[in-house]
Image (spheres, grey):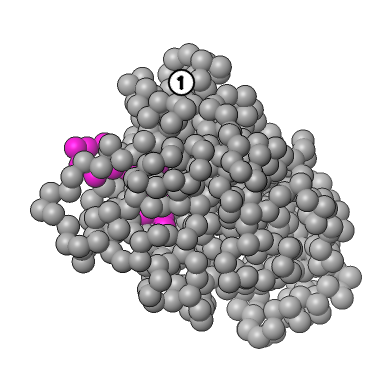
């Protein structure tokens, strides 16, 4: 059950308290071996039954990756053919009330449990918004806000979606996207085409999450029409999976199961990390990418192993992922855990996105040199690429166009690694759409390498040198020239 105990950072001042997903208790049982066999499945069921006896009567274990036989079938023909046995041990505890940390400690004392830990609540990586109120009544006809969407323009200002949209497939034709977060408003007037709605979890009945998801969807695939905004890849088909009711790792896994190789999965979440003991800090300082937690890492690896391109917000904690604090294994994590934020051949395979500044003077504001790291953005060798972290015009929130009807709301203040990551997703969807005209699709590894090899370079800001890596801003024309020409 979601708590609403305190206001969160993804809502406007004065708004009602936003829904907070509960902390998640994750259990890793003793390994079952590298392959799924009849014996492995029996042993796994035996261990699970033993662990169930430790849990309160109201609680139950649920496998994050589903029943073993179905898991094996899902992985049988995937591009990298990951070992199903790697995923059998991951469970989440449902229905447990009271002190989850105390329950996790009791579970860890059992020799059939490899690890048990409590994940803090996930939040959308949205930087604080400037406007405090919804704008006045909307006009009879929504104006064309496309001139405010400079992120669509040619580099180095934007990602050159204006060029891609003139190319065959460059509208994201045939590409499917799933956004993993909390809630959306797919009835919005500019989200009527190529939208598949919520296909997993229980979307929160919450304005903060709903505005956030709506803004993300608008950036990626807002409708191609004469009013409102235009998505980067408006012919990409977008759907959503909510973390409410199922947790983040299960949401990532179920989204991956609904996509084909070459499609795109977006993770619009971050959490309090080890810097402040995994505690919410009153702002977002110390928040990090969700793949730090072993079950989320495994879910991302699962998706990438299926050939799905995973794009993950780096988070808004202002953290250096190369800091030694991230080399220390938390005591409640599995013994074989390794730092996923180090950036190596053994990382998750996700494309991690930092937040860069938009062009100076955009919408009358100045956030520093264009493409410089914004102070809140996490950074480091693990971060692959950047998007605009301020001044993004899209659907939702209502500061640009408001009134009583949410379906008419627009903003030009969407922000954070929240606004940066959908720009990268839109670029990937447009690229894959163009590439499909050559009879192929790029793999997750190829797309990540391409984003690192091309784009408009990161710039420096006072106190934020380019050595604080967030990567380049994607450039679709350069991606096609470097990768393949349709």
Q: Dot 1 corresponds to which residue?
A: 477
Q: Is residue 228 on the magenta stretch?
A: yes
Q: Total label count?
A: 1
* Magenta extent: 212-229
The answer, for residue 23, to whether it is visible in the render is yes
| 71 in relation to 18, above or below | above
Q: Quadrant of residue 134?
A: bottom left
In the figure, 380 relative to 446: above or below? below
Q: Position of residue 354 (x, y in %)?
A: 58, 44
| Residue in the picture at 21% in, 41% down | 144
Q: Position of residue 33 (x, y in %)?
A: 83, 51
Q: Is residue 178 visible?
A: no
Q: Nearer the viewer, residue 133 or 269?
A: 133
Residue located 66% across and 86% down the image: 98
State the image coordinates of residue 291 (x, y, percent, origin top left): 67, 52
In which quarter of the view is residue 448 placed?
top right
Task: Say whether residue 472 is left or right of residue 188.
Answer: right
Q: Identify whether 394 is placed above or below 18.
A: above
Indicate whether 443 appears above or below 395. above
10 Å crowding of disc 1: few (<14), some (14-19), many (20+): many
Quadrant for residue 220, please give it: top left
Position of 467 compared to 418: left or right?
A: right
**In which quadrant is the C terminus drawn?**
top left
Element at badge 1?
helix
Residue situated furthest front in the rendering: 462
Residue drawn 75% across the image and 59% down it: 89
């Amino acid at each position: 059950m979601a708590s609403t105990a305190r206001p969160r950072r993804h809502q406007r001042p004065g708004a009602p308290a936003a829904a907070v997903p509960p902390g998640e208790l994750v259990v890793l049982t003793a390994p079952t071996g590298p392959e799924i066999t009849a014996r492995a499945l029996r042993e796994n069921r035996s261990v699970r039954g033993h662990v169930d006896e430790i849990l309160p009567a109201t609680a139950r274990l649920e496998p994050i990756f589903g029943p073993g036989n179905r898991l094996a079938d899902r992985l049988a023909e995937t591009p990298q053919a990951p070992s199903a046995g790697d995923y059998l041990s991951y469970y989440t505890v449902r229905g447990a009330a009271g002190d989850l940390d105390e329950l996790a400690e009791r579970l860890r004392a059992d020799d059939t449990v490899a690890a048990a830990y409590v994940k803090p609540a996930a939040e959308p990586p949205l930087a604080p918004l400037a406007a405090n109120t919804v704008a006045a009544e909307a006009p009879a006809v929504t104006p064309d806000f496309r001139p405010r969407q400079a992120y669509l323009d040619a580099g180095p200002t934007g990602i050159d979606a204006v060029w891609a949209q003139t190319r065959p497939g460059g509208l994201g034709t045939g590409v499917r996207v799933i956004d993993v977060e909390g809630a959306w408003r797919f009835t919005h007037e500019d989200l009527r085409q190529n939208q598949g709605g919520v296909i997993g979890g229980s979307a929160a009945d919450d304005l903060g999450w709903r505005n956030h998801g709506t803004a993300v969807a608008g950036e990626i695939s807002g409708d191609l029409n004469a009013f409102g905004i235009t998505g980067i890849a408006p012919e990409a088909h977008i759907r959503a999976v909510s973390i409410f009711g199922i947790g983040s790792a299960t949401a990532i896994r179920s989204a991956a199961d609904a996509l084909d190789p070459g499609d795109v999965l977006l993770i619009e979440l971050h959490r309090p990390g080890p810097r402040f003991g995994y505690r919410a800090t009153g702002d977002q300082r110390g928040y990090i990418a969700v793949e730090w937690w072993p079950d989320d890492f495994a879910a991302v690896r699962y998706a990438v192993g299926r050939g799905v391109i995973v794009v993950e917000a780096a988070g808004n904690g202002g953290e250096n992922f190369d800091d030694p604090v991230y080399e220390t294994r938390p005591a409640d994590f599995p013994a074989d855990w390794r730092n996923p934020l180090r950036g190596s051949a053994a990382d998750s395979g996700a494309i991690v996105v930092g937040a860069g500044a938009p062009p100076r003077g955009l919408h009358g504001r100045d956030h520093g040199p264009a493409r410089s790291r914004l102070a809140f953005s996490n950074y480091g060798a693990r971060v692959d690429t950047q998007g605009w972290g301020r001044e993004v015009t899209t659907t939702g929130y209502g500061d640009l166009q408001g009134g009583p009807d949410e379906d008419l709301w627009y903003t030009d203040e969407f922000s954070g690694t929240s606004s940066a990551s959908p720009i990268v997703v839109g670029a990937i969807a447009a690229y894959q759409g163009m590439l499909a005209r050559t009879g192929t699709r790029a793999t997750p590894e190829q797309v990540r390498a391409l984003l690192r090899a091309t784009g408009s370079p990161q710039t420096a800001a006072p106190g934020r040198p380019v050595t604080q890596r967030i990567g380049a801003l994607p450039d679709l024309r350069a991606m096609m020239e470097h990768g393949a020409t349709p």
